[in-house]
Image: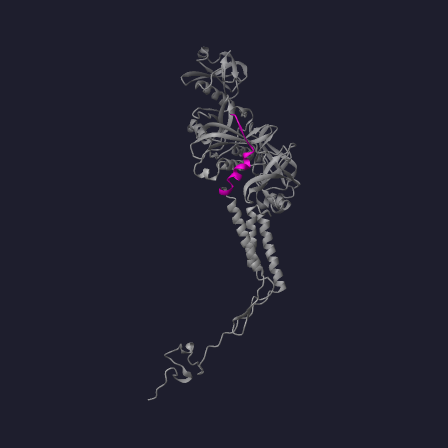
Amino acid sequence: MKFYQFGSFGPGNHNPFNPFASMFGGAGENGETGERPAPPPPPPRKKTSRKGKLIRLLIYLAVMGLVYYVTLPPINPQSRQFWSFALIAVVFAFAMLTTVSNGREDNVFGPDGKPVQKKKTFTLRKLLSIVLAVGIVVYLLCSLLSSPIFQAKAYSSIIQDSVTVKDISEYTPTIDNVPLLDKDSAMRLSNRALGNLVDEVSQFELGESTQVTINRAPVRVQPLGYVGFIKWFLNRDTGIPAYITVDMKTQNTKIVRLKQGMRYSPSAYFNENLSRHLRFAYPTAMFDEACFELDEEGNPYWVVPVLRHRIMMLAGTDVKGVVTCDPVTGETQYYALGEIPDWIDNVYSAGLIMQQYDWYGRYHNGFWNSIIGQKGVVKTTEGYNYIPKDNDVYCYTGVTSVISDESNIAFIFSDMRTRETDYYEIAGAEEYSAMESAEGVVQHLNYRATFPLLLEIEGQPTYTVALKDNAGLVKMYGMVNMSQYQNVATGKTIKECQANYRQMLIDDGILTEEEAPKEAERTVRGKIIDLREAVRDGTTYYYLRLEDSEVYYSLSASDDEAAVLLNVGDAVELEVAGEGAICPASLK
């Protein structure tokens, strides 16, 4: 019997019992022994041609140019938007340009496929890696060092020099010249006026309104805007034809048509877009939100605050000036602080003023005190309102403890053009508590109160609110005593509300008849055509209406017993104080 040697079975030394023999040094298919031949070396990488490099570079520049055109970051290391844009640029460069270095191969392979030499070259990839690493370190370092942990004093000092402590007796705003509407109500009036523009109503919509003071009166000015791209394309040659003004005291609404339409607007497209137009004119400026304002001749302008950071390059936002833009011609002008014209009202936004005061209130005694002891730590309340004074717009907001206790300890009154801030220390109800108190009086009507104005009414610090129905229309007014916010008076007109508030203060013993300021009285005569009576706080009041008049005059039986003898048809002569749907009166 013939035996085969193990490892050399059959022709070609193929071993069916050990198919891996050749992998471990056994005989190959041709009967030869030894190591497996080395694989062929990989083909060398092809060098990028000069044309390919140029194409890649052009694609990169085109894409980044498009990103810049859309996002419009300021070329300014103080802007976080700039750092985001720079990160995108470096990452995209990695993807597109790292093969475009010096055209040399990093490795050379021998016949066995192994690198035999490495050429040390400073490639674009290495350069971008260094730039990216340095940028990330600088950004994180500035962000860390600008934290309030290290910069509490710097944060608190931004507004500190602008704050002046004053006595409440120096607070002068009264009901005579304040806005009786809020922003939402003004928007509704503007929307009604827009409906009168028959030809333009389908082409334009209301833009963002701005509170200004014109001839010492509170006014909201509201530009129109394009309704989408198609409407802009169809109207771009003529521009936006008008803007709307709403007197916040009288509710008078006007449509002001322009001789030439406004081309530059936040709702326009391409280079007529306001943000893009300003960015190309001021590539390094950091802009705040644009405000629509009027100069002394009634010409419209876009007013855009220019910001800066005062703490470690990336924090401590403040204003350094404003840029004005003529929406008709596109002409721009930069004004530094101290050079800003008086007709410009909105240099500092209400949100920025409140943020800066919050920094002062939180950190003026140091960072750790704001966390642990919280001695003297205060903050502004959530809401704010606008009050005119002289020919400027002031921002009003309350100051309360960081511990929520539904009460204010003071309030601030800030000029939005200069940031000069008056601090008045006075304890009383927080604004939202006053709003709820006013709503409680008319809860059966389901009215909602606007954010209040703090005014001096009858010598008393008083929250004044408008009460609106579900449609957003102002139906009544309310006055809430700041120190005793359970004392609330309402009226269908502001004069009626004030008269009822005065009487309430007298009835509650807060004021005496001698202390209560009296309005100028006038005499009315006529025949009674309607007579009603009601009991209020134990006193009978008679309400009578004279012929040719819609006003009811109220007489107190406790003040004048002759009122109980009056009948319809009697001729009377009355001394009347104030105006409104119901006026206090007395028999003459």
Q: Residue at x 52, y 45 (%)?
A: 145
Q: Quadrant of residue 178?
A: top right
Q: Nearer the viewer, residue 336 or 516?
A: 336
Residue 347 in the image: above or below residue 69: above
Q: Quadrant of residue 164?
A: top right
Q: Residue 160 magenta-drawn?
A: yes
Residue 304 visible in the current orientation: no
Residue 285 visible in the current orientation: yes
Residue 435 in the image: above or below residue 459: below
Q: Quadrant of the N terminus?
A: bottom left
Residue 89 % position (x, y): 57, 54
Q: Quadrant of residue 447?
A: top left
Q: Nearer the viewer, residue 142 or 535?
A: 142
Residue 118 % position (x, y): 55, 67
Q: Nearer the viewer, residue 411 or 218?
A: 411
Q: Nearer the viewer, residue 539 or 422?
A: 422
Residue 406 % position (x, y): 43, 31
Q: Residue 144 magenta-drawn?
A: no
Q: Residue at x 58, y 63 (%)?
A: 121
Residue extending farthest left:
1
* Main SS category, magenta section: helix
Residue 422 % position (x, y): 54, 30
Q: How is the image coloured?
A: one colour
Q: Which residues are magenta?
A: 149-167
